[in-house]
Amino acid sequence: MSNENISSNFIRNIIVEDLETGKHDSIITRFPPEPNGYLHIGHAKSILLNFGLSKEFQGRTNLRFDDTNPLKEDTEYVKSIEEDVKWLGCNWNELHFASNYFETMYEKAQLLIKKGLAYVCDLSPEEMKEYRGTLTEPGKNSPYRDRSVEENLDLLERMKNGEFEDGSKVLRAKIDMSSPNLNMRDPIIYRISHSVHHNTGDKWCIYPMYDFAHPLEDAIENITHSICTLEFEDHRPLYDWVVKECEMESVPRQIEFARLNMTNTVMSKRKLKQLVDEAVVDGWDDPRMPTISGLRRRGYTPESIRNFCTAIGVAKNNSTVDSQMLDYFLREDLQPKAHAIMGVTNPIKVVITNYPEGQVEMLEMSNHPKDETMGKRMVPFSREIYIEKDDFMENPPKKYFRLFPGNEVRLRGAYFVKCTEVIKDENGEIKEIHCTYDPETKSGSGFTGRKVKGTIHWVEASTAVSCEFRLFEPLILDDEPENEGKHFLEQINPNSLEVLEGFVEPEGIKGLEPLDKVQMVRNGFFSVDNKLTTSDKLVFNRIVPLKSSFKL
């Protein structure tokens, strides 16, 4: 993140004060995802914040996998997270797994028991909920709360040794069942789970809860500033309690900031996983998904995401950002560097009846509409070309300046053509359009005669390269999809993907590799799909249209 943005960052101000007062000589931050799904655009904000702050202050940032729930975690997610963080341009100083600290965490649990601050509880989940109380009523002490230190140590050891079934016992912190903060009402810190862990295998059958493990991880790694989102604000007293009562030498400071919410975008890994599991999308990297892998496959650049996160800044209050804002920064990034080519996404054939048969003419065109330094390319032109179906209407409305019977338009970089006849098949469908051309109107010839109001793009038919175009609309129709009053699956856009078969000019695609970007004249910025493209078939994803009504 840029210094310009960080200057107005309240977290940065805290760090500056801590360094100036000598509380810390340097800072250490961390990005601690749970490997239970793929990262999304909301995680990008946290990644860039943590890594950006440490870079500015010559500190360090760890990548740590908070892998304390083996039922949901997988090595696939670990690898995807590492790839996403690197792709965003961030390099961690140390790589850690919470599971590597399980032995230390178990020892700290024993310490809490010895101090009379933890106990083994046999209440069922339903009973525990009943005993917990409400926001307005205090909870009740568990009947197992006064077990002796010796009994608790023995039961914890037997839990660890696998003597008890899942859910039959838990280890709870002994804090205050009348606390106004429900997180402090004797929270569970260990549960039994006879399941194989992606990192530790079957060594453990008890696993620490997040609220117990996370502060210990931060303290073990000497994290100075533990930056998290606002939903953890009510957990901070428990975070501080664990660090203090477990007698950790290093004392991190938890700081909360507002998470990223975007219109038409789901920011819940659970919901995103549901989209994958129910085949609403074709995987975590579906170009309609807000996952970093999905954005990468669609064609977004790390620069556009970094600039977007810089612009939205860091705040204490939740708000919702227009998803078109990300598209704005994508256009800003690609406009000066993406080569321009011509492609027809939904073609109809045009025959120029007075153009010489068998002749193919090479026309010189610029590789960029505003930057001549990007050079030029030769584009073939002949008697038969393809244009967009939307660029022809048999019975047009007023102020329609594209092609229609009797009207003349300019073919971009080529000639004026006039529609003379419409050829239809036996079903009355338009088969092809016949036109004549004026050889005096060649682009660049200095022609100063009549003018036309419409200019359309085209692709020469005999050399056209067939390809697939995948056009996207928002996957979620609701501007506020995280609204708990609605089921997000009811907000799925049935028209979020349109697949079209079309053509591109041959010279413009030479050397294109998967994920390379181009700007197709009038149609938008496109990226070569890295999953569907083969040696026999070129597949383009439209990242965004060329223009938007969104204003920054």
Image (cartoon, rainbow, N blue to C red):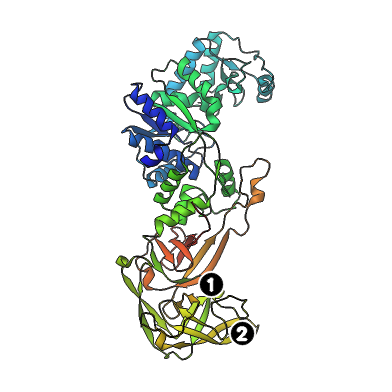
The picture places residue 384, in percent across and down from the top left corner, at 46, 84
Residue with the mark numbered 1: 346
How many C-alpha atoms fall within 10 Å of the one at disc 1: few (<14), some, or many (≥20)? Answer: some
The earlier-in-sequence mark between 1 and 2 is 1
The picture places residue 231, in percent across and down from the top left corner, at 55, 32
The picture places residue 177, in percent across and down from the top left corner, at 62, 16
How many C-alpha atoms fall within 10 Å of the one at disc 2: few (<14), some, or many (≥20)? Answer: few
Q: Amino acid at mark 2?
A: Asp
Q: In the rendered view, does 405 fall on the left or right side of 464?
A: right
| Real-space CA distance between mark 1 and mark 2, rounded to the nearest whole angstrom | 18 Å
Q: What is the quadrant of residue 62 in the picture?
A: top left
Q: Amino acid at mark 1?
A: Asn
Is residue 466 positioned above or below 224 on the image?
below
Residue with the mark numbered 2: 425
Residue 544 appears anywhere in the view: yes
Is residue 420 positioned above or below 552 on the image?
below
- Camera-nearest residue between 22 and 424: 22
Task: Name the secondary structure under disc 2.
Answer: loop
Q: In the rendered view, does 66 fall on the left or right side of 393?
A: left
- Camera-nearest residue between 552 and 70: 552
The residue lying at 44 percent from left, 89 percent from top is: 355
Q: In the rendered view, does 491 fall on the left or right side of 343?
A: right
Question: How many numbered marks appear?
Answer: 2
Residue 161 appears anywhere in the view: no
Is residue 96 positioned above or below 531 on the image?
above
